Image: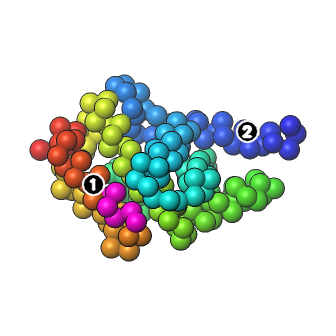
Amino acid sequence: MKKIIPIINCATRLALVNRTVGYRDGHFENDAEHSYQLALACWAANKQYNLGLNDELILKFALIHDLVEVYAGDVDAFGDPQQIVLKKENEKKAFAKLKTEFGQFEDIIGMIEKYEERKEIEAELVYVFDKLITDVNIYNSKGDYYKSRKIGVDGWKSWFLNKINYDSLDLKLKPLVDESIKEVEENFKSSFYG
């Protein structure tokens, strides 16, 4: 147990990082809740869309995708522009701190590096769904996230396609992304401004 206590404490700290959206009215999820939901969604997507990807990699990437936020905190995608600009630099510093503090967990540290590189399609899938499940949660909770920030469907779509770098996205994922965008445009309109 002694060798595992540091990572248990790290996971606890992840649960203390609050996000700006939630999955029910009046609740803002934390990074641990978000990571768990993301892991299940990506695992299910792999099976439902017959992607043939490595489930273990998907689950590992989903579990660690926001671990740097233990030190960097969460940054609202449509929030303070200055924080958005500083996000990458702050996450680099946070990763260096994670490596120092949790270097004995080489597999976990290595997975964070691989996720950030996004060379594996499994990491791309997690990155794409990291952006999409928020929309489902906002819609289900009847949240006003996009309305309060004056983000319409077209603004969201432009941001999303740029964020996931659609043009260089693995061809296996493009149909899933196209279907997801269509779903948002047709059925989630009430979540958006305008």
**Callout 1 secondary element:** helix
Q: Is the magenta stretch mostly helix, strand or loop?
A: helix
Q: What residue appears at the point 31 percent right and 61 percent down from the top-left corner? A: 175
| 133 or 86, nearer to the observer | 133
Span highlighted in magenta in the image? 172-177
Left of 4 or right of it: where is 43?
left
| Picture quadrant of residue 110 | bottom right
Report if residue 170 lies within the magenta region. no
Q: Is mark 2 on a helix, strand or loop?
A: helix
Marker disc for residue 8: 2
| Residue type pointed to by label 1 | Glu
**101 to the left or right of 176:** right
The residue under the point 45% across, 58% down is 51
Residue type indicated by callout 2: Ile
Q: Name the residue under label 1.
A: 179
| Residue 165 picture location, percent across and down | 36, 69
x, y percentage for residue 194? 11, 44
Q: Can residue 146 be seen in this view?
A: yes
Residue 111 picture quarter: bottom right
Instruction: From the image, state whether disc 1 or disc 2 is nearer to you.
Output: 1
| Left or right of residue 138: residue 39 | right
* Percent position of residue 46, x then y: 47, 52
- Judge left or right: residue 89 versus residue 48: right
10 Å crowding of disc 1: few (<14), some (14-19), many (20+): few
**Is 176 in the magenta?**
yes
Q: Mark 2: give few (<14), some (14-19) or many (20+) Cα within 10 Å.
A: few
* Comes first in the chain, label 1 or label 2: 2
- Residue shown at 54% from the left, 40% from the top: 36
